[in-house]
Image (cartoon, coloured by chain):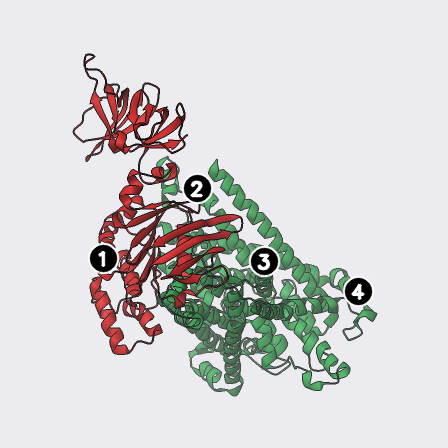
Amino acid sequence: MAGISLEHVTKRFGELAAVDDVSLGIADREFVTLLGPSGCGKTTLLRLIAGFMAPDAGTIGVDGQALSTPGAVVPPERRGMGMVFQNYAVWPHKTVYDNVAFGLTVRKVGRGETRARVGKVLEAINLTGFEGRYPSQLSGGQQQRVALARSLVVEPSILLLDEPLSNLDAKLRERMRWELKDLQRRTGITFVYVTHDQSEAMALSDRIAVMHQGRLQQCGPPREVYARPANRTVADFMGLVNLLPGRVVRAAGAASAVTVGGAALVVALPDDAREGQAVQVAIRPENVRLAPLPDAAIGTPPDAAPAKVVEVTFLGNLTDCHVMLDDGTRVRVQAEPGAVFDVGQRVLVRLDARACTVFHE
Amino acid sequence: MVLGIGAAALLVLVVLPLGFLAWSSVTDEGRLTLDNFRTALSQRLYVQALWNSLILGTWTAVLSVAIGLPMAWAVGRTDVPARKFIHLTAVVAYITPPYLTAIAFVYLFSPNAGLLNRFARETLGAPALTFNVFSMSGLVLVTVIHTFPFVYLLAASALQSVDASMEESAQILGAGRLKIAFAVTAPLVAPAVLSGALIAFVNAIALFGSQAIIGLPGRIFTLPTRIYALFDHPPQYGLASALSLVFVAITVIALFLQRRYLARRSYVTLGGKGSRPRLIELGPARWGVCAFCGAVFVVAVLAPYLTLVAVSLSKSWGLQFWQNLTLKNYWFILLEYDVTRRAILNSLFLAAAAATLSVLLGSLIGWIDLRTVLPGRKLLDYASLIPLGLPGIVVAVALIQFWLRMPLPIYGTLLIILLAYTGRYVPLGVRSASAAFRQIDPSLEETARVTGAGWLRTFRSVTLPLARPGLFAGWILVFVPALQELSASILLFSSGSITLAVAVYNLYETGYLEAVAALAVVTMVIIAAAIALATRLGRAAATGDRTSLAS
């Protein structure tokens, strides 16, 4: 049982608030990812949870017991957490076995039991037979596993991971992703995971906490954060997004509408939006569709706007298009790979109103 | 062709003199014999010298760690105040010629006239507090001041390159401070510390000046001073050669251990890019640590310098310092004593010429090794490292034997000293040149070749300008020690080719105590000025290069 609660946690470095009034509850056995660009404070937050630094304000507790307050911090060595570092920090002067056994030695576990537990954890991460090797004889991925094994062997209830996959090549990264997820399911350890890679965050997490400039922007399941970003920063960080200029034509709850380049969209508005106000409409490229211009007799559907194709790139699994609305707004569209459009061709752009989020200008 | 030039130079500078040294050690008037080695390894006189050298080297190495390691830790890992200042202490202690430190400590602690001894005896009435500098402890003390910076510098960079995550991952696994220090930090920096200790050992036993100044009055003979004594008339070349080779063997073994240990157990580079050392907040303990470093500053820098300046301004050195101030000593040294000017000019010329030659030769060898596939290039590279194992006095012994048998009468001229310096410091030239060239991607040179520039043109307009800051650093690296070289010069000089360090030593031997101090101060001013000028020039050269790269 190990849930973590952060309440109004703030950490300053001089003038800069690296972590600014962050409150977040992490449930037992949950996989939560702190996501954000470099310098957003995610690593600082992780190190605060580990106890490597004291908060300037707020408290951090585990299972209702306060571990970090501005005045008193339980040191990392007495928290019983595990941590995996970005550079693995596998000790180069110790063999794989000695690396993994270290935590047990510190806990004064007997020799026989140590051997059994190290053997078991090495088997779990496919490193049996590597006990006598030194880290310099291992590949990056293997070192990564040693670092994991070293943290897991002491059976922590909380495991902190600081960009553990960022030094691996793309293929290995993908495989380790699944291994990590699988591991978390099997062990039931609470994972707090730091990364700047949104696809990694989405693949792994139960919930994603997006951070920017020290502040928590949004926290929710991957789908929610992706589809319903709380603000432009989150929308922008969670993948490709078009931010289109629009105008509120009707502010009436569920029947509210905005226009974008001639298309009228029925969407939810921010609470305080008024009629006639300029807004920004966020929509991801995969939620925009292109269609040939219809006959004049049929007419244009209300959620569509005429545009001209400016750029077409075939990417294999999709066709990446840039089109320009008649008011000059550029829209990026990810169409199915079979769609064939020519540069200069006039098309209709259809925006999926259900996938739009409206932000203040 | 280039290979030929490099090989010929090394042959004349290093290999042939060594060959003659070896030959002379096993011959006696033309017939082969092992008598010289038998004498060197069995007669009390020489065994004692060997033993003393080993004791001196061992104690110096141990104490260098005892001083250098805590300082490195304080500067690299704690919030101790005045870190820049502590670092500067080590640098100044390293730059100060050890024979000047030795002379300064004689002024303070010679058994009868030493100022602090007299103060203890006459003013405090506590003869128990006196300290006889003419002893092994005195010799170790003076030597350590010069050698602890080796440990300090190596340990500091090792401590800095151990990433905090190495220690933090032990901490999160439950290890306390002590456990982390012993299980993680210590093993990671041990190779650098041990390496520093061995370099301290090798340097300590090679210093002729301090061992003569401190050791001889205390009747503590060491290998350099024994070898030196063998050149009194009639010179015993064979025995001197044998003793020199024994000396070389010790040095080479120590350096071999150092290299092998480093090669097998060097982890410090693993952290690589942007490692973030872990800083410890010491709290009130920082003042204790600061006091320790302050004490090192007082003993290693403040005391010797203050003493030399004070003595240089005294009519006669004693407790009534303020009553007999004078500038007469400087007047004498700078205007009346005609040796001074000759020595200064000789040393400046020799240092500049040796630095230039070492770097040129180093560039040639480094370039051949890195950029060509000529057969024998590795051999050349190894040959250029031989002098690392040769104490200065051994270089002198070898050169003397070689050139006395050559038809060119260069013995007693500046040229033979220049050859000695160049030979001694060519490894520094090779190392800095290799480092400089290694940073230049071969594609930059290949681009020039592709656009039609010849080999020479490419070297001149691409390689050299890009390598210039590194080469210049190498030049300074040779220039500074060459300016104060004593161990080889002492056997090679004549009255016309006297050097600064020899002038100081001779004046001291003659007993002009106050004048020596003045000359010592002048020496330090020249060294300091040369370093200041060189770094300024170097910085200008480096920034000039950067702008030319950008444009």
Q: Nearer the viewer, residue B263 or A49?
A: A49
Contact? badges 1 and 3 (CB < 8 Å): no
Residue picked out by circle 2: B462
Label 1: state its secondary structure. helix
Q: Nearer the viewer, mark 1 or mark 3?
A: 1
> Left or right of A270: which side holds B154?
right
Which kind of residue does numbered mark 4 sit on?
Lys
Q: Nearer the viewer, mark 2 or mark 1?
A: 1
Rendered image: mark on residue B328: 4
Q: Earlier in the sequence, mark 2 or mark 3?
A: 3
Q: Is residue B414 visible?
A: no
Which kind of residue does numbered mark 3 sit on?
Leu
Chain of the residue that carries numbered disc 2 in the rendered image: B
Residue picked out by circle 3: B350
Rendered image: mark on residue A185: 1
Which residue does the image show at 27% across and 42% down from the upper left? A223
